[in-house]
Amino acid sequence: MDPTDLKATFDRDGFVVLRGLIDRRDLAGYAAAVDRAVAVRKSADHRRLEEKSRYEQSFLQCQYIWEDFPEVRALTFHPAVCEVAARLVGADRLRLWHDQALYKEPGGLPTQAHQDHPYWPIAELRTVTAWIPFVEADEATGCMGYVPGSHRDAPRYVDIFRGGEDAASNVADQARFVPASPGDVIFHHGLTMHMAMGNRSNAMRRVYTAIYFADGCTRDAGEMRHPSVDRCGIKPGAAIDGAATPVAWPIVDHPVPEPWPQIDDERFRRGVQLGIIPSLP
Ligand SMILES: O=C(O)CCC(=O)C(=O)O
């Protein structure tokens, strides 16, 4: 897609699909690296799908895997992906907020509708997620649906973690569901309302995402905690520029992560135990 059309589509709809942005052979290597990360991170979690919470039944989630699995970095900092992301948020310099594997298990439930930005303590709205499938993402495996234009709506926090409100029931009718193939990348704005279908197939729906933001964005004034800023002591009003959120564009050498502080907090311990966050010393 022509770069001007790309930005115009993103500004109009709040999402845009780039077909074949990543070479399929390269993608197979990245997918193998992310598979290894998920296998290691999730090796201590032996629960069956039905033993998990509503949220956990929508996908296995492993965040910040670029940090403890260096071979994932070639995807996190993929030049074509980062260049498009920078263009979409109108930034000369782009930073990574965090990455994650979102593997929807066979029988996995639909991902409930939500906007992402309300989960992040970032004051400015210049954020974008790259959604990168390793398999055919379709109505059987769990493709994404986006509500066109919803990035112009006010931020609304939906507590999908506790499964309180099934916002999907209200907005699924307005969503455009977008099948995607390996090599395609779908970019969505941090305020775009989105969801995903359940996985009715017998195979894992393997997807990797990376969230980027324009360099210069600052921590908002609220009290929300988040490792991407807390780890580096970023204070409200300050630029988010710590080692947890390295520059991703223009092209840089792959960054080297800093160790995670040991936080004496039950939620943090549970996150490590379930493989959601790294157990880096
Ligand atoms: O892949 C999914 O099921 C949901 C993805 C999502 O919510 C996101 O990338 O923000």
Image (spheres, rainbow, N blue to C red):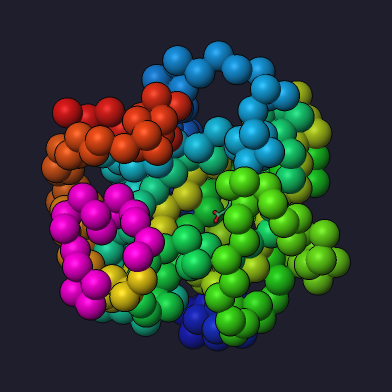
163 up-or-down from 105: above or below: below
Q: Give whichever of 248, 261 is nearer the camera.
A: 261
Q: What x and y, as percent, mark residue 232?
A: 16, 55
Whether residue 265 appears in this view of the structure is: yes
Residue at (81, 66) in percent of width and height? 170
Residue 229 highlighted magenta (yes or no): yes
Whether residue 135 appears in this view of the structure is: no
2 up-or-down from 265: above or below: below
Q: What x and y, as percent, mark residue 247?
A: 21, 61
Residue at (80, 46) in percent of width and height? 139
Q: Report whether 167 appears left or right of 13.
A: right
Q: Give whichever of 281, 133 is nearer the camera.
A: 281
Indicate the quadrant where residue 64 lies: top left
Quarter the C terminus occupies: top left
121 up-or-down from 23: above or below: below
Q: Report whether 100 appears left or right of 160.
A: left
Q: What x and y, as percent, mark residue 201?
A: 78, 30
Q: Which residues are magenta?
A: 223-239
